[in-house]
Image (cartoon, rainbow, N blue to C red):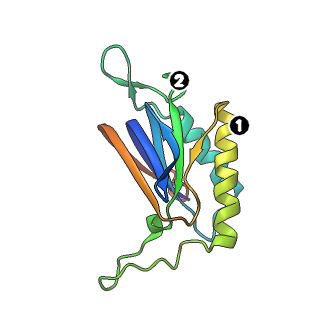
Amino acid sequence: MRILIQRVKEASVTVDYEIVSQIEEGLLILLGVENEDVEQDIEWLCNKVLNLRIFNDEKGIMNKSVRDIDGDIIVVSQFTLHASTKKGNRPSYIKAARPEVAIPLYEKFVEQLKTNFGKEIGTGIFGADMKVQLLNDGPVTIWIDSKQKE
């Protein structure tokens, strides 16, 4: 699983001109699922997301987590995070999981995050043409791959 985390002052997801999720300060997470992903990837990533200290403390140092600031989270599915650009100019998405694999893992990720966080998690709509709007704070953008635990 790959996630792209963006620290935001605000974010929203719109589908067919209707806002389906909206938050103020918190995290916008783009989630890409690949065929080899398992539930252990979900557990590891959820813990990483909720404890990642990327919000400023009183001294302006990134020392607080989304929990510490009582922020909010939106998770949006994004298969293009698994794009391979090794050959040619058209990205290949062969590593991205098909919907029958990706949807259950995406839903489990959101549910696990909600359980661990103790708050509702905003989402997009899997497979929909979504318009994601955000005000990146910092900017702070972090990429994490559960297959590359560094």
| Residues packed near mark 1 inside 10 Å, few (<14), some (14 to 19) or many (20 plus) | few
Give the percent coordinates (x, y) of residue 47: 60, 39
| Disc 2 packing (10 Å; few <14; some 14–19; many ≥20) | few
- Position of residue 40 in the picture relative to residue 136 (left or right): right
- Report the amino acid beneath label 1: Thr
Residue corresponding to mark 2: 70
Residue 25 percent across, percent down from the top left: 43, 30
Q: Nearer the viewer, residue 38 or 130?
A: 130
Instruction: From the viewer's perspective, tell me whether residue 37 is left or right of residue 8.
Output: right
Q: Nearer the viewer, residue 9 or 30?
A: 9
Judge by depth and name the residue closer to the eye, 143 or 115. 115
Residue under numbered circle 1: 115
Specify the quadrant that holds the N terminus.
bottom right
Is residue 70 depicted above or below 37 in this figure? above
In the image, what residue occupies the spot 67% across and 59% down? 105
Residue 56 vertical position relative to residue 20 in the rendered view, above or below: above
- Position above or below: 94 against 135: below
> Upstream in the sequence, badge 2 or badge 1?
2
- Find the distance from the CA under tag 2 to the CA under tag 1: 15 Å
Q: Quadrant of residue 85?
A: bottom left
Query: Residue sitting at 68 percent across and 69 percent down?
Result: 101
Is disc 2 placed on a helix, strand or loop?
Answer: loop
Q: Are marks 2 and 1 in contact (CB under 8 Å)?
A: no
What x and y, as percent, mark residue 5?
44, 46
